[in-house]
Amino acid sequence: MPSGSAASGRQWATLSADMAESADSDSDETLMLRYRDGDAGAFDLLYARHRAGLFRFISHQCRQAERAQEIFQEVWMKVIGARDRYYPDENAQFRTWLYTIARNAVMDYFRGQAKGELQLFENDDEESVVVQLPAPRTELPEVRAASREQGEAILRALEALPAPQREAFLMYEEGGLSIEEIAKAAGITFEAAKSRLRYAVAKLREGLREYA
Amino acid sequence: MTDPRKDDHLDEDLKALSAAYRAASDAVPGALGPPAALDDAIRAAARRAVKAGPHPVARTWFSRSSTPLAAAAVLVLTVSIGFLSLDDPKVQVKSKLDDLGMAQPSSQRDQAKLSAPPAEPAQPVESKPKAGAQARIEEALPSAPPPSPPPKPASQRTERAKLEAAPGVVAQSPVSPPPALYVPAPPAPAAPAAAPAPAAPPSYEPPPAALTHSPAAAPAPAVAPAPIAAATPPSPSAQPSDALGRKRADTATGIRGLAAEDPQARSEKPTAATRTANRPDYEAVIVQSQPAKPAASTVPAAPAEPKRERPAPASIPQSVGEARAAKQKEQPAVAKQFAADPPSGGLAARDPAEASGAVAISGSRVRVEEARAKKDAVSMDAAKRQSEAERAGADKVAAEKFAEKTARAAAESDTALTAEDWIKRILELRKQGKTQEAADELRKFRKRYPDYSLPPELRDAK
């Protein structure tokens, strides 16, 4: 006869599997509405879907682990607090809403810690952005020490990107947002979002070629 | 068609980069997500938030009581407006007017629309639908008289309708003076006086002087009816009394209607006498606005008739000069009367049209005017009587002028028609040997017809 803890573990695994199946069928918006209506399990599913991507989005932007965790927690607390006001819209999906909150939190961080990068967001001229680029963090000793493998080259290239381009790439890669959703979350036009993404891709490819 | 927003090269680059990025991200320690403690803290916060339920909305006293307050305010406002509407005489008059208009038999209205009755029926209330029917009647008849005088101001109409709707007001025939201007008076003295009213010549009868006298009290001016009939286009029913009765029923345009018929009289500047003559109408409106109050008792109506210093019909001057002389005699008397007992509050000095507008402004204003009118009722009555006499004299003068004018025009028209006969007459005079008379006639003829081509025998007379 199995022990109680093992039985409860199997039972939890079964429930988790059921929840995972239902989570696959439910959209983010449905889960958020269920959580708004009092279903705490819906929030767990929603959190499980977006926790890693959102955390990477934040940590790649602010570059400080502790600060990234604070921002991450702040974002989810805002989601919890705004659950009563959440209303799904065709033009505003949950992911867009979530990454808009995260972006605003990161911008607040830039405002207090990295005003140089904030100016990059304010100045949307890509050519001037290139001119005003700070020294790539890949040239820093600690970063160079961290990049021991070839796969990490892209991360260094990502960190070397201007903040607006990095944000656009992370939204696309981690959040799974389309160019239109990126534009909506960042509050820019579609062409601007596409341009940022194109610049980011070009520079990342160049970085990969360098470290290949 | 391809989507202009789709960029194949960008998509391919992104796919290639995505794989490399995923591999690199997974290899980095700590890149999989936040620490477990942070996950637990966030989930616990989410559960606490769900257990706490929806956010308690801090409702202030105002937010709690805003709905009942709004409902109470709307209720109070509605009731206030309702009371104000009941208190407003204009609204009352309108409602009464509507009631009367609705109460009018539909068959009568239809008859008025479809056919022109030989005689206008007695209709004490001249409501708007009635005015429309009257207009249709006049349009339907080719020989209809010119349009009636311009409509009265709305305030006068409503006041009159209110007075007509007052209890105790007897409907009068169109020939008789308008019932609206009559206060329910003691019937005994008024009854015999009302008898000769229809027999009096309706033309140039002065407008009814409010409530101070009965219709019979108005003296019939000694004006020859023939010129007046010629001046006034006949009604379709060939009853000039109907048309004139309508005029008489129009209280506000009594004097103005007469002035409209006589351009000379219209061009005359309104004198103090005419203003004084119009004042009783205004005061009557004021006093009549409270039919329940014994306003008639303050103003002597029919019993005061013998006191009136009006010239008897027999003593009416037969010429314009005599009428003017009589008018000049009466004017000092009126001035003396006003000097001895001046009306207070400037009511008498006010223009009648302005005063009528003041009545229509608000009920409170009307009440003030009523109080003022009651206060001065006795003194104003004497002034009214004087003004009636004055007005009668002015009317007679105007009538005489018009008669003269009409006679002159008739004579001129006769002369114009007999131009050729005039030539024949001149020729006959010459044949008879009356050369001097013929020359005089020819001179007159040339003066009158300078461009007339004379026959050859008369051209020699030059």
Image (spheres, coloured by chain):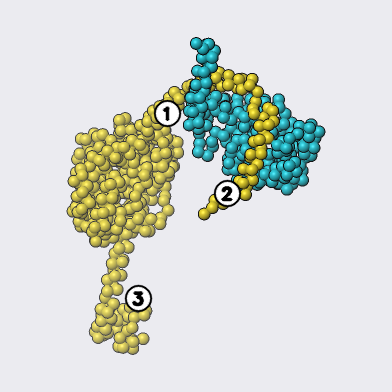
Chain B colour as displayed: yellow
Percent across and percent down for residue B24 are 68, 35
Q: Which chain is cyan?
A: A
Which residue is at the front of the view, B10 or B170?
B10
Residue denoted by label 1: B74
Residue denoted by label 3: B448
Q: Nearer the viewer, mark 3 or mark 1?
A: 1
Same chain for marks 3 and 1? yes
Which element is circle 3 on? Answer: helix
CB-based contact (under 8 Å), mark 2 and mark 1? no
Q: Earlier in the sequence, mark 3 or mark 1?
A: 1
Question: Is B132 drawn above or below residue B451 in the view shown?
Answer: above
Which residue is at the front of the view, B294 or A47?
A47
- Residue type, mark 3 in image: Arg
Q: Nearer the viewer, mark 2 or mark 1?
A: 2
- Residue type, mark 2 in image: Lys
Percent across and percent down for residue B313 are 26, 49
Q: Using the image, tell me which numbered label, if any, was put on residue B6.
A: 2
Q: Earlier in the sequence, mark 2 or mark 1?
A: 2
Single out the residue that lies furthest toward the front: A1
Which element is circle 1 on? Answer: helix
Question: Is residue B198 at least partly visible in the picture?
Answer: no
